[in-house]
């Protein structure tokens, strides 16, 4: 019978010995916010605007955590319903991350064709987005909000 124990214990011992040792100081990698994360969110937002997808656009935001989030959601709904087409260009200027929040500065240009056939609306603004991590990074504020509306 002792050989049976060796046959069972030896593979278990080898398995444990081959597992990478983890020191107590190792922590799981935090979900950091950087230029790449900001660029991905801005790209999703741009694609949503140009694809005229309000749902995809709002997916980048946590409307429940935004100050006056429901008003912002209504503003975006109105913007999409008043526009025939949208072209946008966003140039990332700076990302500043502090803990669970980040600030994203963007040079943005938008051109919107009104649905009623009026003249093209063209705007250039520097926009500031605030992002929060819980559990996925989303924008919780944008200033000035008027960038996403027709005059």
Image (cartoon, helix red, strand yellow):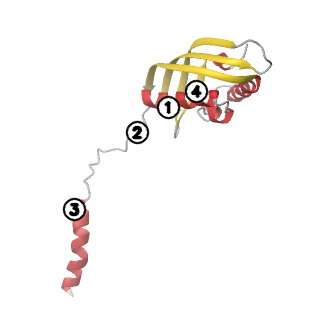
Disc 3 is placed on an element classified as helix
From the image, tell me which residue sits under label 4: 46
Q: Is residue 73 above or below residue 15?
A: above
Name the residue carrying label 2.
30
Q: Are marks 4 and 3 in contact (CB under 8 Å)?
A: no
Return the disc, 4 or 1, that comes first in the chain's sequence.
Answer: 1
Picture coordinates of residue 56 (x, y %)? 63, 35
In the rendered picture of this protein, how many numbered marks are placed on residues?
4
Residue designated by label 3: 17
Labels 3 & 2 near each other (Cβ < 8 A) = no
Q: CA distance from mark 2 to mark 1?
A: 18 Å
Q: Is residue 9 left or right of residue 40?
A: left
Q: Disc 4 on helix, strand or loop? A: helix
Location of the C terminus (image quadrant): top right
**Pair 2/4: label in front:** 4
Instruction: Tell whether label 4 touches label 2 (CB within 8 Å).
Output: no
Q: Real-space Cα distance between discs 4 and 3?
A: 50 Å
Any mark on residue 3, and which? none
Q: CA distance from mark 4 to mark 1?
A: 10 Å
Please give the residue where the numbered disc 1 appears in the rendered image.
Answer: 40
Q: For label 4, count other residues whose C-alpha is less than 10 Å away and answer few (under 14), some (14-19) or many (20+).
A: many
Q: Quadrant of residue 85?
A: top right
Dot placed on the residue nearer the N-terminal end, 1 or 3: 3
Mark found first going from the N terminus, 2 or 4: 2
């Amino acid at each position: 019978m002792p050989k049976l124990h060796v046959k069972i214990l030896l593979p278990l011992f080898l398995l444990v010995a081959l597992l990478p040792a983890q020191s107590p100081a190792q922590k799981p990698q935090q979900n950091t916010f950087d230029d790449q994360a900001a660029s991905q969110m801005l790209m999703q937002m741009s694609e949503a605007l140009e694809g005229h997808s309000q749902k995809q656009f709002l997916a980048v935001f946590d409307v429940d955590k935004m100050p006056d989030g429901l008003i912002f959601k209504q503003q975006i709904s109105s913007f999409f319903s008043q526009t025939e087409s949208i072209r946008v260009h966003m140039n990332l200027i700076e990302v500043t991350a502090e803990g669970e929040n980040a600030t994203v500065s963007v040079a943005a240009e938008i051109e919107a064709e009104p649905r009623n056939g009026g003249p093209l609306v063209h705007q250039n603004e520097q926009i500031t987005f605030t992002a929060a991590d819980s559990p996925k990074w989303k924008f919780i504020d944008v200033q000035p909000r008027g960038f996403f509306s027709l005059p």
